[in-house]
Amino acid sequence: MSNEGKPEVGEKTEVGIGLVGYGFIGRVHTLGYMNISMYYRGLGWKPRLAAVCSRSETNRREAVGEAGYAWSCADFRELVAREDVDVVDCCTPNDTHLDIALAALEAGKHVYCEKPLARNVDEARQMAEAAREAGRRAGVKTQVACIYRFIPAVMRAKQLIDEGALGRIFHFRAAYLHSGYVDPMRPVSWRLSKAQGGAGAIYDLGAHILDLMYYLLGDYVEVMASLETFIKERPSQADRSVMVPVDVDDFALIQARMENGAIGIIEVSRVATGANDELRFEIHGSGGALAFNLMDPNWLWFYDDTRPGSPIGGLKGYTKIETIQKFPEPGGFPGPKFAVGWIRFHFASEYEFLASIQEGRQTTGATFEDGLRIHEVMDAAMRSAEEREWVKVNHRN
Amino acid sequence: MSNEGKPEVGEKTEVGIGLVGYGFIGRVHTLGYMNISMYYRGLGWKPRLAAVCSRSETNRREAVGEAGYAWSCADFRELVAREDVDVVDCCTPNDTHLDIALAALEAGKHVYCEKPLARNVDEARQMAEAAREAGRRAGVKTQVACIYRFIPAVMRAKQLIDEGALGRIFHFRAAYLHSGYVDPMRPVSWRLSKAQGGAGAIYDLGAHILDLMYYLLGDYVEVMASLETFIKERPSQADRSVMVPVDVDDFALIQARMENGAIGIIEVSRVATGANDELRFEIHGSGGALAFNLMDPNWLWFYDDTRPGSPIGGLKGYTKIETIQKFPEPGGFPGPKFAVGWIRFHFASEYEFLASIQEGRQTTGATFEDGLRIHEVMDAAMRSAEEREWVKVNHRN
Amino acid sequence: MSNEGKPEVGEKTEVGIGLVGYGFIGRVHTLGYMNISMYYRGLGWKPRLAAVCSRSETNRREAVGEAGYAWSCADFRELVAREDVDVVDCCTPNDTHLDIALAALEAGKHVYCEKPLARNVDEARQMAEAAREAGRRAGVKTQVACIYRFIPAVMRAKQLIDEGALGRIFHFRAAYLHSGYVDPMRPVSWRLSKAQGGAGAIYDLGAHILDLMYYLLGDYVEVMASLETFIKERPSQADRSVMVPVDVDDFALIQARMENGAIGIIEVSRVATGANDELRFEIHGSGGALAFNLMDPNWLWFYDDTRPGSPIGGLKGYTKIETIQKFPEPGGFPGPKFAVGWIRFHFASEYEFLASIQEGRQTTGATFEDGLRIHEVMDAAMRSAEEREWVKVNHRN
Amino acid sequence: MSNEGKPEVGEKTEVGIGLVGYGFIGRVHTLGYMNISMYYRGLGWKPRLAAVCSRSETNRREAVGEAGYAWSCADFRELVAREDVDVVDCCTPNDTHLDIALAALEAGKHVYCEKPLARNVDEARQMAEAAREAGRRAGVKTQVACIYRFIPAVMRAKQLIDEGALGRIFHFRAAYLHSGYVDPMRPVSWRLSKAQGGAGAIYDLGAHILDLMYYLLGDYVEVMASLETFIKERPSQADRSVMVPVDVDDFALIQARMENGAIGIIEVSRVATGANDELRFEIHGSGGALAFNLMDPNWLWFYDDTRPGSPIGGLKGYTKIETIQKFPEPGGFPGPKFAVGWIRFHFASEYEFLASIQEGRQTTGATFEDGLRIHEVMDAAMRSAEEREWVKVNHRN
């Protein structure tokens, strides 16, 4: 049945999902598994909600009741040990990724993990090494939930860049802006704790936008960053009348030089008043330019500098390419013209991971290797901010 | 168990769904039922995919295989007869709504029906009457899938209008624009057939935008319309080398006078090149204005004319209210800040219908009465176009 | 020197301007004459502010003092009689256009006249006939200040339509929306008086947008209109404590069928809360679509339906063509990339009129013939609103 | 008449303008002087085009012919010496500003100078010192043509920030993006020469955007910059078949820390494909946010975080404040609602300078002191880029 611990999923009609952590993001991932067979039609396989793990009894009960998980437990080691679990999906706080992933990889499970990959670059390195090893040993696949690679507009951007439509890339600006922490009375959570989260906005939001630029533009060479903690103390979650210091950043500004010669600025903020879920980028090259904003996700803006400029403007100008829900087949549902929403990108990311397992191929998503690389960039940025100087992004080995 | 044929759903933990028609829109509705317990959390009940009906064996097989319907059949009468079906959802072409709905209502089932309600105003009237009768007899509820009432931006528009934020409403413009039929070689389908569809764009798109203006602004008094069939013949679906005449409109322009004294223009098109799913409206009143566009669904634009105008512009200007995914509780998932997509509105519409059943109250969605009223408007518009004059919208009786 | 009364402007280095009416719009026209030699460089001629006429002594004094008119008078007949006046520019209320224009044409002067051409279609017909006669007799040129023909974005739209880039035109929507009369305490002025203005929004704003659609799409066949006076009484200008009835429209909605088979809606409003100077149009054809908004005047939006649609959106989508200040030579100043403003279109319109005189050719602006045609459309629309039926736009003879 | 060399302009009805350099920007400035009395009505004074200086005979001839300068010369010293020149306006390349300004200040003339103030910080310091001295000695006024301070949207932004509407300012991003040098075959001009221009994009575009952030947010503390010359050689202007090296930047990225505790990124580019004249900024504070884009200059976007957030979005969202042409009185012409264009900001800047002279008060524009400060910032940025480290912006003395 399983060979060296790895389920031969390709031959099964169901892929058993074991989810660890049924908080907000666990529910989001669960929705993906519930919906994949509807959005990606005609597959020969289907995810099955085999097992869920949570330390919270309430969450376990809800996972079974509302989502329909077949089995639940409080200790991830039990989940990892189950025969009917093919994929372990890690939706817990950053400080727990390492243990869960190592156990799952050890058990020959494919692992899908929330971003950032780990609590720090060392843990990320251990996870990437374990993934490499499990891949060699048992064909195990890994993926980080860098879901924005799967926005149709981003996929189209990738195509255009790869085709050379932008020519030589000069410079870019990218940002991931949230306003969720503008309120100074929002209490400390694991996302505001270095011990649990590892870092603040640079991890939470940076892991996404740094991966996206990496995906679109290639590797980083060096960074020069500033980190800020604008709101330096917040109420304790345990006792809201007590203020406790915040030991992670709420803002980061990263100048980055890329291997392709481009230079750009990448910005993340949790205190960007007026922003909701504002991930955006603009890229300028010798042949054209691209722009995207996640709050208006139906369009990729493309400036083709080879279009004629006359008479009176000719055809020069940004084209608002209607990428909308133009997911590649078999992901055509619900159709190309209906406004796309955020959660759809999770479905596409999960589908790609499961499909890569089914088809025994490399995912186009971020692997644990990619996740490690982004940790190397974030680590370099944090050191740069500390030392106030440019820092090379160490090459992986 | 059931009393006079009506299931006492409020006491059950599951609501049995019987879906008729598993084409595109049937799949969309099914997704709603699959997802409701995740998006609307903490409910004491849950939809159950009890039965599906389709004349296509393939569709039946897929409905069971990909969506998980428990049972399937080819004849809607069998479905309607089942004890475990509480709600009949009608997702078939317009010419079949009448029979299915009458049978379901007769059997005391709640009925959720795709728009337009029927193939013509007479059929709509029969359906509304049957719904009224079944409501009286057995507390049966009905709803038309006018899903755009459930966009947070639209719900906010309704609040602002009802609060008087627009003052006296002067005039408005509204449109629902598609480009799907610009290609003259797109073959004839039931949507291009008067016998099956009843009419063209005015039914398909008009049913939505006319309901929306009705919901927001109140009742219609009279209309003056133009209908066009720009592309007068198309390939037959059976044999694409044969061109057949198109007997329904692909464009309609409707001047409308409302009971509240407002006048406006409502436009629908299937040949609006450049449009994807472009439902939009702008409303101007003595105290302010509103604007919305479905292709940018995260925002309601509100102009508050009471804001100060100086110095240098003061605070006057349209506010892009961030309605995004701010669904009222318990619909808070996946959270207020993530870009909303089209399919979410279906979920909200279905939830409201099922909740109104659970709670034994009137839906805020469009009832069959409302669906009839919209048919009366469409009927008046079609007669107006034919006779080239203003036509009163007959009052329901 | 002058031959049959008409100055041979082509041989002069200066074109003598005689302006009648130095209110707001008279000042705007004056700015054009002052600036033409700077914006249109290298011309062999130059406008000269020869004479100004106003019944207001203050206005006359200002015209001389701030603008530098060489001479002033209170009676337009004196101005028209002057040898050094080559062009008479009529900037007075609508009810005075007829007399001024007839006198000027009689004297062999070229006439540039504010829109609408006259107070009603009969007066417009007299003016067009006089213009025709003076043209034959003395090569006299006329132009109506339909300045929006000269927006680079509009000029580009005209090119694209003429090249067939839109294919067969299906339908369009156009509007000219102002909010200036939302305040019910704004007192009555000549623009709110039938006796002086002839009509309300349909003349003031309609003259522009109806001309624009005529320019872009060709002639009108028939119209079906609604006119409203939402605010039915206003303070008298003489005594603001006295309310007087308003006898002109503040809103009009015009369904129009065009000779080219297109159908569209044209809307004008003076009570469109939230609008500033919102002239806009959208045109859909079998091959593409166009959109423009005067409040964002740097861009013409063009949808080219022949662009490839795949992969993932291909290159399909509206292009925001950067027309900005791309005025044709010699109007290149101040350069193509700087944001264009409203007043620039006046300069372009005046330049075109003077250049057409210099070069002895037809203007691309609206002639008095065109102005008459627009009056015929407005007249048909007003009758249509009165009779509540479609009205043919009589053909000129 | 004149007292200590300084004309008592306040008592004169005309202000004599002596313009040095009649290239593109000289023409733009000239338009301002020609138009001020029309846009700013009811003034007791008026600019007079007294004298123009250019080394080009063609330009001199045109300045007299098309603009109407009363007198011309080839040597700025002659112009500076004239009694009828009250204001010297310096529109020449950067390397000539010092000599012209010193001579003019020495002669007690008010000086209006194009940006950047000088070719380098040392020259700027000499100019600021001479201005200070001439101010003390003879009440002489100076201003740098930082025209974007005079956009109504920017003036409104300044008011809102000064009123505290943004609360504590956290971070900002600003950019001034041009694409004019994307074409590698565009030949070298003085703007691409260190000897004449002093620097590239950082001077040409940076002088504007750095001043704007200084105006809005206050003083700079330190900067960390990167400069790039993406296109390293270009055709010589003398012989286009010869490529010559480019010794100035075409791109700069500046992280800046401000005295008020804010941190931000300021970006300038001459190779930002797709940009025309894209000056923009976004500022986030604890109480709100602001955004502006010069290519859509009619609006200031303001997010007021104190607005209510519920129900369903409440009134939270960016308001597109309609600043349009809402210039403070007496600059109300041509009226508040008509789309504003770029050149209007020059008029406003020149008016403010002349009004400050008339009224013997401080200008709200950038003085030579401010111009020096911006040179100190640019100088620090260039050193930072060279040394790859943070550089303090030296305090003026």
Image (spheres, coloured by chain):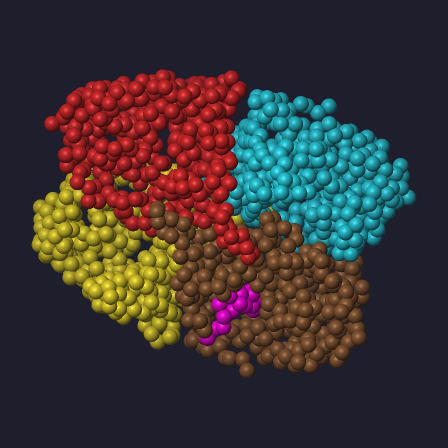
Chain colours: A red, B yellow, C brown, D cyan
Whether residue C251 is situated above or below residue A397 in the rendered picture: below
Q: Position of residue D27 (x, y in %)?
A: 72, 49
In which quadrant is the C terminus of chain C drawn? bottom right
Q: Position of residue D17 (x, y in %)?
A: 80, 47
Q: Quadrant of the N terminus of chain C?
A: bottom right
Mark yes or no: residue B13 visible.
Answer: yes
- Residues in magenta? C203-221
Q: Residue at x 45, y 61 (%)?
A: C165
Residue C216 falls within the magenta-colored stretch: yes
Apparent side of residue B324 relative to residue D129 in the rendered image (left or right) = left
Q: Is residue D283 visible?
A: no
Residue found at x 44% / y 45%:
A301
Residue at 15 percent across and 59 percent down: it is B100
Foreground residue, B165 or B209? B209
Q: Quadrant of residue D97?
A: top right
- Residue A126 in the image: state x and y as whole percent: 31, 18
User: Which of the two residues, B290 or D200, is positioned nearer the viewer here?
Assistant: D200
The answer to whether B335 is drawn above or below residue C16 in the figure is: above
Q: Is residue A154 within the magenta segment?
A: no
In this view, the residue in front, C179 or D389, is D389
Residue drawn at x 75%, y 73% as measured from the top left:
C7
Residue C379 placed where, x, y %?
Answer: 52, 75
Task: Report the magenta stretch's main SS.
Answer: helix
